[in-house]
Image (cartoon, rainbow, N blue to C red):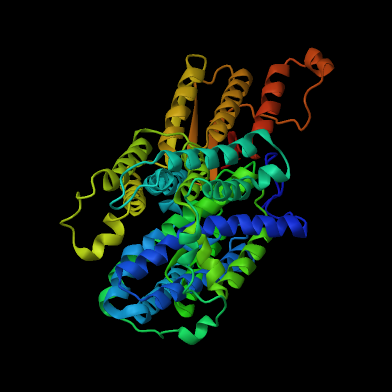
Amino acid sequence: MGSDKPGNLVYGVDDKPPLGINIMLGVEHACIYCISLIMPVMVGRMAGLDNRAEVFLVCMSMLAAGVGAVVQASKRLGSGYLCPPVCGPAYLNASIAAAGSGGLALLCGMTLLAGLGETALSRTMKRLRPLFPPEVTGLIVAMVGITIIKMAVSNMLGTGGEDQIVEGRELFLAVFTLGTIVGLNVWTKGNLKMYCALIGMVAGCLAAIPLGLLGPADWEELRHVPLFWIPFLAHPGWSFDHKMLAPFAIAMLCSAIKSVGDISLCQKINDERWKRADMDSVSKGVFADGVGCAASGLLGGMGLSLSTSNVGLSLATGATSRHIAVWFGVILAALAFVPALACAFVIMPRPVMGATLVFAMCFMIVGGMQIAMSRMLDARKTFVLGVALVAGLAVDMLPGLFSLAPGWTAPVFGSSLATAAITAVALNLLFRLGVKRKVELQLALGVDASDKLFTFMREKGREWGALPEVINKATTAMNELTETVAFLNPGLKSLAFHLSFDEYNLEAVACYEGVPCLFPEKRPSPEEALKSADAPALLSAYLVKQYTDHLEATRVDDANRIRLHFNH
């Protein structure tokens, strides 16, 4: 990880920024995290919890997120990336149901159980690799950004609930905040670019004061919140209910699927040569996500899942160092013991929060699309992406579409992200049926061999979902080999290639009887070309060797077997 740091990153995943920059970036990511605190507040209010229980839920969720971020940043336990957890929307409906029927104790117990379940699921992620090709993981990442469009825009405009009126001052504040953040990100470098979101939020909050959107009345809400406390003394304990198993299991599965996309995005933005998801890193990432969720249930918070917003922020600022996660964790842990300061983030003007979310959201959506389009797409993969995207968007655009579905399915059909992710995984499995991973290509030498070869490989590349550059290398190498064999064996009428493909390898094996091919290590010199009658064959054979990652030529009796291997 981090061996091929892209040029747009100031601090790559393994770089260690100076202490001051680490702390400032930790604060910036903490501000983005605090936007998610609306989730435990919604759980508390919709479940009828008292004010003290709400504050406890918020603070313990913060403390658990700090723990989860540090574990996630560890290469030994987690993925080794800056990808902190937040109060996840995937757990919202299940958490409200649990808190409403059994109070905080039931919520804590079921959240703990869900986290432990995800850690167990993480052990199987390597075997589940076929479920998560780039088009599926890319769609999941993009859908995370798409699903927060409604929340981000409604916050920007200051609308929601009974308030459907867009005030000019709220619109001005949102545009001012977003303009400040984007302007600093696009037209500045160094610290101003790295701190663009933090500077924009501070500038937005200051601008909100003369606009009357942040004043004494807002701070009055914090009057009854203690300045400092030991939250563990208010812990309600844990309880369990088998009726809650299905909702939390579905929420856990959705969170795990989302984690695959988030870790894949982290891999891509930190590695210029990224080709596919490293499932070992993904497995550790899902494990760390489960640890964070379990820690939240153990401490007294709500379910956590990885934050694509923070990943988007790290890409936007060019600082993806995992060392930032340590300070992020320290800051959140400290805030958990100072509830008045922690809850101050909750009164941040909504247009400021919405503008910051829109900024991070842009990088989520584009990053997801880049992952999804990194492979060649045929009709099957097009339908995987298209149908899953439509299914996900339908949940938000037609809220009553799944109103008749059983209540326990709410975590799936109540979330456009979950609906799109599960649809994509299911369709990917369905459309894998009938795809041949081993095929034979018969070429008639001297007729239309090149045209047939290029057309065949382009079609198979789309069907397999292979990387375009790998298909191009293989096609060129096979074409050069065909010309070499034809030149050395004028009487040979045809040449057959036996191809096999999996997610890691592409192989093409040619067998024929006749004069064997020699593959020189060095490019033939002009002098050798003039002296040798076989110069064209030597040059083509040299090119074949350059295009392949491994070449093996064997001869038994009169039969030649040439194996071309390409890493995928």
237, above or below 279, in the image? below
In this rendering, does residue 554 appear at all?
Answer: no
Residue in front for this viewpoint, 126 or 359: 359
Residue 345 picture location, percent across and down? 52, 61
Residue 418 sits in which quadrant?
bottom left
- Residue 534 shown left or right of residue 164 in the figure: right
Query: Is 151 on the left-hand or right-hand side of 76?
Result: left
Q: Position of residue 556 (x, y in %)?
A: 60, 40
| Picture coordinates of residue 216, whole percent (x, y) | 50, 60
Find the residue positioned furthest to the right.
Answer: 527
Q: How many marks?
A: 0
Q: In the figure, 137 relative to 341: above or below?
A: above
**Residue at (47%, 66%) from the top-left corner?**
220
The answer, for residue 297, to whether it is visible in the render is yes
Tell me which residue sits at (43%, 33%) in the image: 462
Q: Is residue 408 left or right of residue 159?
A: left
Of residue 54 and residue 305, the one placed in the foreground of this image is 54
Comparing 386 with 544, the one in front is 386
Can you give x and y, in whole percent of width and height, for residue 254 in the image?
A: 38, 59
Residue depicted at 50% across the width and 53% down the height: 214
Which residue sits furthest left?
Answer: 404
Q: Quadrant of the C terminus?
A: top right
Q: Indicate whether 233 appears above or below 285.
A: below
Which residue is at 30% across, 45% downward?
A: 164
Q: Is residue 396 left or right of residue 551?
A: left
Q: Nearer the viewer, residue 11 or 466?
A: 11
